[in-house]
Amino acid sequence: MYNKETEQRLFKLSKKILNNTSIPNEIEALSEAQSLREVIQYHEWKYYIQNNPIISDFEYDSLFKKLEAIEEKFPDLISPDSPTQRVSPDVVSDMPTVEHMTPMLSLDNSYNAEDLNDFDKRVKKVLNFDENLEINYVAEPKFDGGTIVLVYENDLLVRAATRGNGKAGEEMTHNAKVIRSIPLKAAFSKWGIEKVELRGEVLIRKDIFNKINKKREENGESIFANPRNAATGGLRMKDPRETEKRHLEAFVYQISYAINEKGEDVLEDFKTHHNTILSLHELGFKTPKDDIEMKNCKNIDEVAAFCNQWQEKREDYDYEIDGMVVKVNDLVMQETVGYTSHHPRWAIAFKFKAKQATTQLLNVEYQVGKIGSITPVAKLEPVQLAGVTVSNVSLHNEDFIKSKDLRIGDTVLVERAGDVIPYIVKAMEELRDGTEKPLEFPKYCPINAEEQVALQRVEGEAAWRCPDCTCGAQDIQRMIFHVSKAGMDIDGFGKAYIEKFQEMGWLKTMADIYRLDYEAIAQLEGFGEKSAANLKASIDKAKQNPIKKLLKSLSVHHLGKRASEILAAEVEHVLDLKDWDLEKYTSIKDIGPVLAQNVYDYFNNDKNISLLMEMEALGVNMKATEQDRKAEVIEGGVLSGKTILFTGKLLQMSRTVASKLAQSNGAKLLSAVSSNLDVLVVGEKAGSKLKKAQAIPSIQIWTEAEFLEKVKG
Ligand code: IVH
């Protein structure tokens, strides 16, 4: 329907209109209205037909409101084809089209308590109510699936259809019949109803969705982007047996039409929305549970509180929901409040903070870590996501970039679910105009532009590393780690000082930390005598640290707290280690071959030995202390005695590596969540295990980063 060029043009035009806050004058209004109509129609097509929106609901609403404002100011400009004048987009289908008994409008959106209050005021205004009078509303989840419209005649399900354009939808009775929560027969006649039209939402449970996707992945089939796509796709299957395999469910949330045998409208006999839902439940329909999923609220403040509660717990719910729906409870009052051409005035959606947003990938920067691993970081056009501004997102490693085929200039979809770190879901390929630049992972150290230091990738690891840093980038990271709490723990010394002193030309290697000129520091802006003296005292104190701390602070790959303690307990002097051969390391229990090789390499490198000698000459203790000897009796590693389980997709290491790391740090692996579990480490897209663990208060839930921090100390 839209070709790629048109899609790109319309996307750019939308963003341009959204960024423009000026109000058009009479001359500009016509072309602005035409542009708005064109882009709104396009976004409706993306949303309803393609199930693939590329702007947020908030942005769509802003566009719609802009058009409404222009048309209100210049009514002559209203054209019959304006999106404000009709319900919604065209039906595209090879399934028979059927007309609904009552046209289905959309819902207006609200985003916070203030919007809800405005809605409440509007309702009162239409009803001529005094501001102080309270209106009774019902709030319930806004299910994020596919709309279904069901018709029952003489108690039998006779027709089911999708929403379509609101006036007519696609008939799919054969598929609805395989959805177990839709009764084939329901006793409406006991209420004197002959024909009734119901509205509801077809959904797929999150855990079932995950299982289906896993199976599809195993079979080499494409996976569904989200439960909504799996549900709406399921409704449109040609073969109902295929629909059945998706285990769809349907919640019913409205009666839109009801007549008795005389053809009289009996809808208002139900009196309230709350009663309607309870009655439908009684007839065997799946409906929101009273007081849990749905609340009969005595005023708008109660509504706001209930909506906020749900915003907090939406991640734990079995189904995807993207907000709440707030409805005037009294059915007669609903009709009095009435409708606009676009939505009912008696209802509003309370949208949760977006978990996803689209933005532009401006650039990728490569950061060098303390052991030389190169981490690509995406620089994004800042975008609001679930309440925070996101402008930097880690791309983890080369494999991640390749699997997503990311390019500079791409419009990307960013997601932040719950407390999970934001990540890039995908690039919007349909918006590419050919100017996007494929990402080339650097072959050489990205910081050192002059000398070409080739990067290396260790077999079995995802990271590229700079094996022999000559530019100082790694030294800075190492120094930052060296002074940190996890290293020598130099009180008051941190990243900012390291960067500042490095900029002054005072720090090139770790040894320089111990030859700082405190008089010069005192002269620096923002320092003074006192802070220079404090810094000196902290550094002098750290010089006396036990050698286990020093060993750990050297940034030898995999040499964490436990292994440093073990080694410290084995030597009289740190430099004794330069005489050790590989076997001597591996003969020690708890020192694996990889770590052994790393420590061996470190102490067989002349540069490192001179550094340590230099540090010793500057007063850093290199001799084992009482504390170092005691280390022998310290039980196990940092996870000693703990049980641990990993769930979800880990991004920085494989499951095997994670499990080994956990075990080498003293943890015992479990395979299921129970009260015996101490720690659950959650990766991307964690599912039922996370949910189960959240219900057991004694279980600690760590992110992958937290786990790494703990084991690497
Ligand atoms: S009431 C006039 N209640 O949201 C429309 N809609 O446009 C009355 N939806 O796709 C709709 N959960 O399928 C209503 N509890 C709920 C809902 C709900 C999801 C969907 C509906 C439609 C859109 C509203």
Image: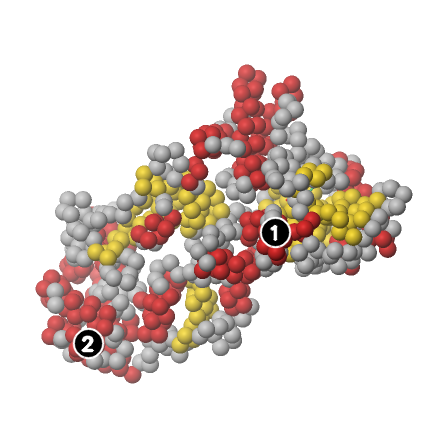
Q: Position of residue 56 (x, y in %)?
A: 52, 41
Q: Which residue is mark 1?
A: 239
Q: Position of residue 706 (x, y in %)?
A: 39, 63
Q: Which residue is mark 2?
A: 585
Residue sitting farthest toward the right: 262
Q: Residues within 10 Å of mark 1 (few under 14, many from 20)?
A: few
Whether pointer 1 and pointer 2 mark residues with C-beta atoms closer than 8 Å, the reply is no
Element type at marker 2?
Answer: helix
Q: Image check: 348 left or right of 58?
A: right
Q: Is residue 531 visible?
A: no
Which picture quadrant has residue 83?
A: top right
The amino acid beneath tag 2 is Tyr
Image point 28% across, 61% down: which residue? Answer: 461
Image point 26% across, 80% down: which residue? Answer: 589
Q: Image check: 531 left or right of 652?
A: left
Q: Position of residue 434 (x, y in %)?
A: 36, 34
Q: Is residue 670 visible?
A: yes
